[in-house]
Image: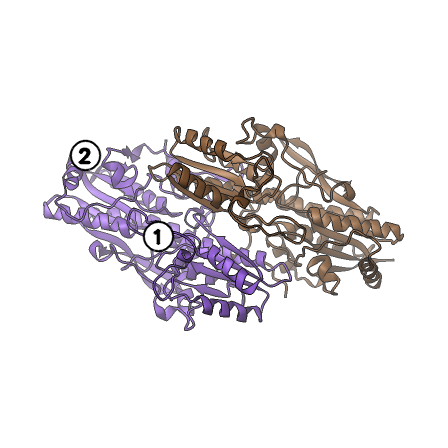
Chain colours: A brown, B purple
């Protein structure tokens, strides 16, 4: 008997999260004849699904389906909704009742750490009740902080955006014949993968960014001022890249030095402004020209800096997940295993989602230089293949054309 | 007798300022046989020239020359240096002595308002002393605030970056099913051209950005809160674009509500943070999810969002200026005259530089909607042709390759 598919997106978006959706839809269509009935999409993830918000994805025109690949954001809408820890909570009864009513046999959730928590809970719940539904997580996060996978879809495009922007900013910052410091604040709460990717911006020895500070290393204000002062003796224009999540040895975020911080629905501290804080610090302490730049959400939604490698892998993760579910796998996340750096080659694997959720993969200390102000050659060797290849979104009137949900 | 060329760049950079330099160099090379001796470039503008900093531009390899077209920043370096008002100041004697020693017959200065002030002073000084040197200004500014020209090179690429980024941000901001406001702060001290270009981001009626606030309209906090509250009744996710230079009816900058402001070398107030101020205002007054994004220097240095139209015009402005100087013109700025919107067609003209310098062209009131929160169809018709066409910078290892001065 044919079963229906339900797919959703959750957490922060990436430039290629809709590539994975494209992969799920197209591979599901390939299997319509034998195994799959309808292809449904949750609107706003599991939270919207609980309000009966879903759509029939077979209604998408071929044009919209193609546009999905280069559309940033989350086409189906997203949520930040944490299912209760108690698997006996009535919400699970409601969810599985809906699954049953809609004859769902295959459930796919595209997301990061918190979304894999949802996959874990739903798959454990299904197993406890012997419900015949295959539940698979499809990874995405620009933070690249999921364990058990070489890297995550979304990271490569964000890294390409960051490296390109930092190279351009380095050019922009060097036009005046006066000492100056430019601080670039890059996304990353606890893991410095994206900030480290700024190292790719360098074109020659000693090129900017001169310093890269990751949250994996305790940040010391005095050492920072000393680092900058020392660098200014060698070159006039210094670009410094910092993770939004840099913190001192006591674990206090540098952005908290300056302002009150709220928390999001998952209890994460909401960070903003360590770049602005350090800008003011340098101005006061060194009295030189200084500017701070927050790359902000363009890191995760720049369509024009998509990495072709990243997009292809995001699509592959979607289609591989459909194959995995059809072969009876459940409670798994699709992961990437790197077979070779040069030539770069990966393959998809499946990992236990319970081993992935609620964990964070940080940059290994061995990939950070001894003084804690840069990443190593091994880091660069790891990240460089992920940013390769250009994708040109379709354009109209000089601007990229995206898929919009009607 | 052959005379030498001296060309320089001044003021803030743009994505295509080096296109104009390319235009000067290539057209000068075309005329080497008959009229032109050496082609010199000032390093860091007139300020560097006064320190004997210049370079021989004929030494550039063909590869570097080609790379110039897609290299942001100012290849020759820039300055913010104002020549004294008194044309009898000894600095003018030094400058013209150097011109004489170097056999300079043609002087080109690529820049904005303040740079045209330099062109004005040098050409008046040359005229007063009957010095045989042709002095021509080549316009550039992302602000598009020069008078006597339809638009300025640099504006089209910045407008394309802004419109693309705002469209992407609109997609990113709409993924959650909760009320939210996203404020995008765009460059522009006194003129709202670049902020107005955000209107191009709209894909359908009612699409974001819902509001656009320009410095040409007095900004009222209470009306702003009322505008936002009203808009939230119609759609959940509101994107608002604001010029960095918005100010109240008393002329006080909104960014000054929050912080102390310094001044730059020309006495301009240094602005930052009206977006951050309005973010906090909305959070306090409306208690909803709000984020602010400062597009920052990427507006002027994004190579990957160059407009092909803008680049072609920047190159044309450079080569036209060489032709003008060779034909004996001086004390002029090369300008654009629009012959037709559709099909878009412009031609280069010459205008009296004394009529250009130290003036600012603002967005006409007729091109701003009556409630002061949007631009008109005429504005959009004006700006749309300027962002057309893609340019792909040469790439290596996934990143754009730029020209670096050795």
Q: Quarter of the image for the C terminus of chain A: give it.
A: bottom right
Describe residue B274's horizontal placement relative to residue B362 as left or right: right
Frontmost residue, A144 versus B246 = B246
The residue at 50%/55% (across/down) is B164
Identify the residue at the far top of this view: A370
* Mark 2 or mark 1: whose residue is earlier in sequence: 2
Q: Marks 2 and 1, Cα distance to the nearest angstrom?
A: 29 Å
Pointer 2 local density, CA inside 10 Å: few below 14, some 14–19, many at least 20: some
Q: Is B14 left, or right, of A212 in this rendering?
A: left
- Classify the position of the N terminus of chain A by image quarter: bottom right
Please give the label number shown on residue B102.
2
Where B286 sits versus A394, above or below?
Answer: below
Q: Secondary structure at mark 2?
A: loop
Q: Is residue A77 visible?
A: yes
- From the viewer's perspective, tell me whether residue A377 is left or right of residue B75: right
Asked whether A372 or B256 is in front, the reply is B256
Q: Which residue is mark 1?
A: B153
Residue contact between numbered discs 2 and 1, judged by CB atoms under 8 Å: no
Residue B138 location (% of width, % of height):
28, 49
User: Residue B93 at what x, y percent from top left?
Assistant: 14, 39
Please name the residue shown 49% across and 44% down the image. Answer: A275
A372 or A385, nearer to the observer:
A372
Q: Nearer the viewer, residue A219 or A398?
A: A219
Query: Which x, y percent locates residue A251?
Result: 60, 39
């Amino acid at each position: 008997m044919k079963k229906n598919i339900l797919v959703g997106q959750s957490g922060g978006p990436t430039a290629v999260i809709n590539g994975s959706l494209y992969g799920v839809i197209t591979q599901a269509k390939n299997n319509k004849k034998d195994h799959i009935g309808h292809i449904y999409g949750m609107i706003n993830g599991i939270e919207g699904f609980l309000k009966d918000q879903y759509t029939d994805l077979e209604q998408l025109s071929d044009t919209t389906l193609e546009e999905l690949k280069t559309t940033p954001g989350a086409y189906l809408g997203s949520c930040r909704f944490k299912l209760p820890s108690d698997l006996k909570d009535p919400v699970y009864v409601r969810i599985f009742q809906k699954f049953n009513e809609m004859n769902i046999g295959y459930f796919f959730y595209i997301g990061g750490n918190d979304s894999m928590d949802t996959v874990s809970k739903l798959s454990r719940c299904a197993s406890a009740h012997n419900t015949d539904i295959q539940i698979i997580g499809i990874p995405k996060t620009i933070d690249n902080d999921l364990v058990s996978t070489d890297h995550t879809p979304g990271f490569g495009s964000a890294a390409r955006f960051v490296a390109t922007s930092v190279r351009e900013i380095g050019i922009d910052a060097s036009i005046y014949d006066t000492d100056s410091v430019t601080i670039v604040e890059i996304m990353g709460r606890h893991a410095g993968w994206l900030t480290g990717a700024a190292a790719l911006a360098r074109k020659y020895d000693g090129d900017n960014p001169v310093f890269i500070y990751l949250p994996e290393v305790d940040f010391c204000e005095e050492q920072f001022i000393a680092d900058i002062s020392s660098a200014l003796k060698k070159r006039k224009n210094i670009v410094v890249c910092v993770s939004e999540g840099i913190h001192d040895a006591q674990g206090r975020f540098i952005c908290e030095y300056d302002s009150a911080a709220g928390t999001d629905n998952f209890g994460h501290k909401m960070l903003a402004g360590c770049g602005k804080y350090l800008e003011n610090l340098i101005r006061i302490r060194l009295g030189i020209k200084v500017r701070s730049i927050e790359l902000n959400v363009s890191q995760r939604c720049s369509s024009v800096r998509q990495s072709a490698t990243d997009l292809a892998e995001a699509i592959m993760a979607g289609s591989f997940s459909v194959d995995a579910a059809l072969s009876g796998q459940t409670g798994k996340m699709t992961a990437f295993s790197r077979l070779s750096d040069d030539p770069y080659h990966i393959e998809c694997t499946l990992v236990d989602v319970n081993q992935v959720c609620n964990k964070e993969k940080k940059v290994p200390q061995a990939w950070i230089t001894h003084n804690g102000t840069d990443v190593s050659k091994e880091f660069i060797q790891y990240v460089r293949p992920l940013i390769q290849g250009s994708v040109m979104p379709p354009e109209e009137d000089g601007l990229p054309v995206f898929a919009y949900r009607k």
